[in-house]
Image (cartoon, helix red, strand yellow):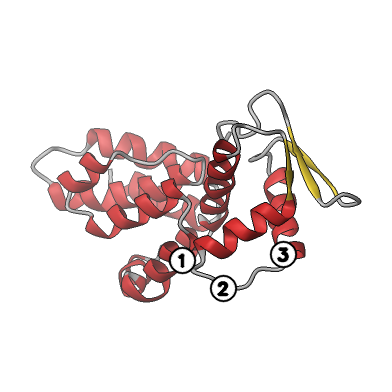
Amino acid sequence: MTYEYFLGKSYLLKDDYRKASECFDTNFQRCPRFMKRNKASILIHLCISKMQFGYTPSLSIVAKYKLNEFHDLLLAIKQGQLYTFDQLLKTIHHKYFLSKGLLLHVETLYLLVVRNLFRQVWLALNKENKISIEIFTRAIEWSNHGEACDPLQCATLLATLISQSRVKAYISYKHMTVVLSKEDPFPKLQ
């Protein structure tokens, strides 16, 4: 089990999240129930590797293993709250994630937060498939508590999400709109 744990950490450092989650998943299942600290340590790394694919653990399992740092983070990710996510990383739980060696991996979840914010905008607009980039820009500003966002910066975030297949769409720069796919524009992450 120890070997699998450190092998998973090695994969995590190499950004091979699929292999890391496989190692941590089998390790978590094999770990005896009475070893709560070990299970909690495995679960932390398992959560980070699975969240890269859009899977978020249930809040009940986070509470069971007393991973309070993840509770607020999960809520911010699920609800697309950029400001809360930034505050949790930069001030509130910065030392915790830094001590676990997971700060950079948690920071990569920023795009997942942006994706969930854009999905909420899409749902609020009754699943409209043509949305102005200006609307997404205002959503980012609102989610960041009024911090200014450039439409070009928003388009860059959208282009990144599209290139990573996190959003099925294309950007019409001539009209500054995003044309989302009519069939599942926010697919499950692979």
Q: Secondary structure at mark 3?
A: helix
Local crowd at mark 3 within 10 Å, few (<14), some, or many (≥20)?
Answer: few
Local crowd at mark 2 within 10 Å, few (<14), some, or many (≥20)?
Answer: few
What's the residue type where badge 2 is placed? Glu
Q: Earlier in the sequence, mark 1 or mark 3?
A: 1
Q: Which residue is mark 1?
A: 83
Q: Secondary structure at mark 2?
A: loop
Quadrant of res 56: top left
Above or below 41: residue 178:
above
Above or below 151: residue 114:
above
Local crowd at mark 1 within 10 Å, few (<14), some, or many (≥20)?
Answer: some
Q: Which residue is mark 2?
A: 147
On the image, the x and y values in percent for residue 124 come to 55, 40
**Disc 2 versus disc 3: distance between alpha carbons?**
13 Å
Q: Which residue is mark 3?
A: 153
On the image, the x and y values in percent for residue 41 come to 26, 53
What's the residue type where badge 3 is placed? Gln
**Disc 2 versus disc 1: distance between alpha carbons?**
9 Å
Q: Is residue 121 left or right of residue 167?
A: left
CB-based contact (under 8 Å), mark 2 and mark 1: yes
Q: Is residue 106 left or right of residue 190?
A: left
Q: Earlier in the sequence, mark 2 or mark 3?
A: 2
Mark 2 or 3, closer to the camera:
2
Q: Is residue 140 left or right of residue 135?
A: left
What residue lies at 68% left-to-right and 39% top-to-bottom? 165
- Front residue of 89 and 177: 177
Above or below 50: residue 30:
above
Mark 2 or 1, closer to the camera:
2
What residue lies at 37% left-to-right and 67% top-to-bottom? 88
Q: Residue furthest left?
A: 34
